[in-house]
Amino acid sequence: AEYMGTVSQVPMLADHPLVSGPVFTELKVGVSDRPDMQSSGVFVLGVGYGTKLLRKWYHAHLTRAYTVTGLFGKATDDFSDTGKLIERSTFDHVTREKLERIVSMTQGCNHKALLQWANLDLKTQESYELAVKGLIRPMDKSPPL
C-alpha cells in the first residue's frame, strides 16, 4: 500500500505584520568619537535624524577633560595598571612641589598649543574676550590638548 499525499503551502504567521510589527528596511546609525580602551565617559550615538546632528556635534569643538591616575615606584610592560610588573623603584625624591611644577608646565604647553590650533589673531579684542571667558577652541581636528 503506497501513500499518495498532497503538498499544500500555508502562510508563515511569524512574517505577518500583526505578529512581527512593521518591517524596517534601513536604519541609519552613527557614532561621534570612539572612546579609548581604558577611558570612560559619554558615548554619543546618533540614530536616524540624529546622524545629521553628529556633524554639528563634531564642529562644536567641545572640550574634553582628562583625569590621570598613577602609582609611583612601579613600572609595567605596557604602561597600564593591568600590565606585568617589570620594575620597582623608590620615589622619595618626588615631592608635591616638583609634581605641581611639572603639571603647571604641562598646562602651559597645552594652553600654548590650544592658541595655535584656534586660528585666532591674538591681538584683537574678540580674541581677548574669548580667552577671558575660556571659550577658545581648536577650529580643526587637533590632538588632545
Image (spheres, rainbow, N blue to C red):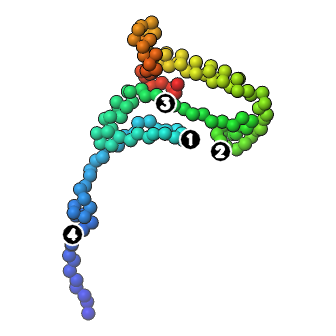
Q: Are marks 2 and 1 in contact (CB under 8 Å)?
A: no
- N-terminal of the pair, mark 4 or mark 1, is 4
Q: Quadrant of the N terminus?
A: bottom left
Q: Is residue 111 left or right of residue 62?
A: right
Mark 2 → mark 4, Cα distance in angstroms: 56 Å
Mark 3 → mark 1, Cα distance in angstroms: 15 Å
Give the SS element for disc 3: loop
* Percent coordinates x, y for residue 56 in the rendering: 34, 30
Query: Which residue extends farthest top?
Result: 123
- N-terminal of the pair, mark 2 or mark 4, is 4
Image mark for residue 11:
4
Mark 2 → mark 1, Cα distance in angstroms: 11 Å
How would you rate the neighbour count of disc 3 (Cα within 10 Å): few for under 14, some for 14-19, many for 20 or more? Answer: few
Q: Is residue 31 left or right of residue 92?
A: left
Mark 4 → mark 3, Cα distance in angstroms: 55 Å
Q: Is residue 100 left or right of residue 91?
A: left
Q: Amino acid at mark 3?
A: Arg
- N-terminal of the pair, mark 3 or mark 2, is 3
Q: Nearer the viewer, residue 37 or 134?
A: 134
* Percent coordinates x, y for residue 26 in the rendering: 28, 47
Image mark for residue 38:
1
- N-terminal of the pair, mark 2 or mark 1, is 1
Disc 2 versus disc 4: nearer the observer: 2
- N-terminal of the pair, mark 4 or mark 3, is 4
- Quadrant housing residue 47: top left
Give the SS element for disc 1: loop
Give the SS element for disc 2: loop
